[in-house]
Amino acid sequence: MPIRLLYSKEPVWVDIGSGAALLCEVPTTMRVWAARAKADRLLAELKDAALVITDAGGTITGAPDLTDADHEDAVRQALFVAALSEIVAVDWRGVLSDDAEGTPLGFDRAMLSELLSAEHASTLFLANYLRPITEVDDAKKD
């Protein structure tokens, strides 16, 4: 089955569930790997900061144990999703405040990691954002 590459130059709306979507620059290898590199750098910084605290006799509470491989992988993936969204997202729709009225919020890149902290939203974002460059064409060729 061939892989269909759909490299539009125009930003596309990426569904993240619950009626919300992010307007994103098209996926490219450079953008994806830049996000991976940023996630790796941020994870290394977190681990270094944790060492400074524990070496000084302090304890860390309310944070994943980065000495556990599974927790480290989960944090790396969460950082990747946040970094990727910060690199590619240029707008959003269907994002509401948590006040009683559910006021629509204007796009704020600084809030993307919070928006995508919900597992379903981050999973949908990754799947839907990366789909155009990895979609398999099941149609038969004549």
Image (spheres, rainbow, N blue to C red):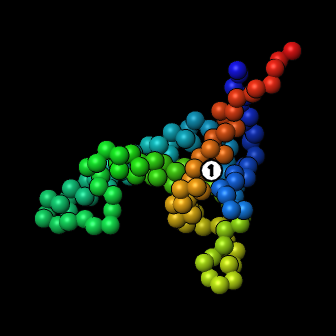
Viewer-side residue, 66 vs 38:
66
Percent coordinates x, y for residue 39 in the rendering: 43, 48
Q: Residue furthest right?
A: 142
Residue at (65% x, 33% y) in the render: 134
| Res. 30 image quadrant | top right
Compared with 18, 128 (above or below) is: above
> Is 113 positioned to the left or the right of 39 in the image?
right
Q: Looking at numbered disc 1 in the image, what kind of residue is underneath it?
A: Leu
- Whether residue 75 is visible, yes or no, is yes
> In this orientation, does residue 83 appear?
no
The quarter of the picture where residue 131 lies is: top right
Seen at 67% across and 68% down, the residue is: 95
Return the residue found at the far top. Answer: 142
Q: Which residue is mark 1?
A: 124
Quadrant housing the N terminus: top right
Total count of labels: 1
Q: Which residue is at a point 62% across and 51% down the rendered structure image?
A: 125
In the displayed structure image, the side of residue 45 where residue 125 appears, left or right = right
Q: Give the left or right position of residue 114, taking residue 67 as reference.
A: right
Tell me the residue at 60%/67% (across/down).
108
Q: Identify the secondary structure beneath mark 1.
A: helix
Judge the density around disc 1: few (<14), some (14-19), many (≥20) Cα neighbours within 10 Å: some
**Image spot of residue 32 (x, y percent):** 55, 41
Considering the image in quadrants, where does the C terminus appear?
top right
Residue 84 image point, x, y percent: 54, 49
